[in-house]
Amino acid sequence: MNTKVKKPLKRLNVALVCNTRIMDDEFQVEYDPPDTIEKIEHAIRSADYNFMFIEADETAFDELKRLKPDIIFNRAEGIRGESRESHIPAILEMLNIPYVGSNILTTAIALDKGTTKKILSFHGIKTARFQVFDDSNELFVHEISFPLILKPNHEGSSVGIDTDNVVHDKTNFRKKLTEMLEKYKESILAEEFIDGREFSVGILGNGNNLRVLPILEIDFNKLPADVGTVYGQKAKTILDTPLAHICPAKISDSLRKKIEQISIQTFNALNCYDFARIDLRMNASEELFILEVNPLPGLDYNLEEKEISFYPVMAFAAGMNFDEMIQEILQAAIDRYQLH
């Protein structure tokens, strides 16, 4: 596939702003490993742009102000706080620097699972019934049925999620809730567990140029039995295998169109820009429920290290290589800001 890059009138200075993964711990799993950073740099330079790198830490503001790039390829997950993914976008808007990806509000909302679900529900987009808990003794105030799955409310990349997060009664619910509140020091989302097929959808572009990449399905039969049907952090980071990624998913045209439609609706409801990944579950009645919305989807693709993000898999299935994927994401932002 040949990416049609509209060359700007001048050679743009493009800065990659991200958090570099330096430790293999639970809380840096979202950060970009050096291999991914190198791949993104190669893609930007291959498009004949000037490349800069800025670490997304406390020094980022001064570096951005000093260098003032023409556009930022934003990959910053943030270093602390419930709205950490919105910190770099906020700085960039203050400095009037264009950037790839969703804005301050969208990145903040998407990192709050409960608020995301409320917005989607307002737009008539199905998500599992849920409640957010701040205290282990907090009572249920909504109609909600077991089994439930518990998730840290302000984390991504399946942080804090594994098979034992699915609970089948109030006793185990209280026990797991207490453990998670103590460990993660944040509110915990409890939602009805949808036991069914799981799909991931990559979206690229904006407005009339928006398109859905080939849909990916997780084949849980290709993962160890103790994973069950929970694609948690252990499954993602330790047990994952490309054999479990069916892309394009083997589904009917009618189901594909249905998944594409609800994914586009979700992308637009949250005002996402340029690219995003949306995860869904389908129950036995073929009802679709949004699980997660990620406006900063992982871009890792290193088979040797088992660092495999879904978005590149879907882009490859669409006929792109890694360079073309990055260049098309960047081009979507360049077009949006009209930097031609």
Image: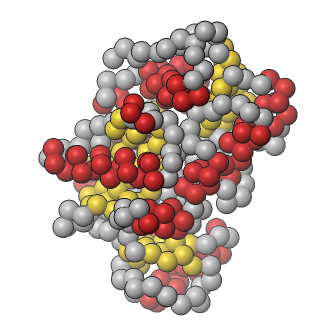
Point out residue 248 in the picture as x, y percentages from the top left corner.
25, 38
The answer to which quarter of the image holds residue 181 is: bottom right
Taking depth in this image into account, of 136 and 176 the one nearest to the observer is 136
Which residue is found at the position 71% from the left and 58% from the top?
81
Point out residue 326 in the picture as x, y percentages from the top left corner.
50, 26
201 lies left or right of 284: right
Which residue is found at the position 58% from the left and 57% from the top?
109
The answer to which quarter of the image holds residue 73 is: top right
Vertical position of residue 305 compared to residue 163: above or below: above
Vertical position of residue 182 compared to residue 320: above or below: below
The answer to which quarter of the image holds residue 17 is: top right
319 lies left or right of 20: left
Vertical position of residue 106 compared to residue 305: above or below: below
State which quarter of the image contains the C terminus.
top right
* Scheme of image coloration: secondary structure
2 lies left or right of 334: left
Q: Is residue 162 visible?
A: no
Q: Is residue 270 visible?
A: yes
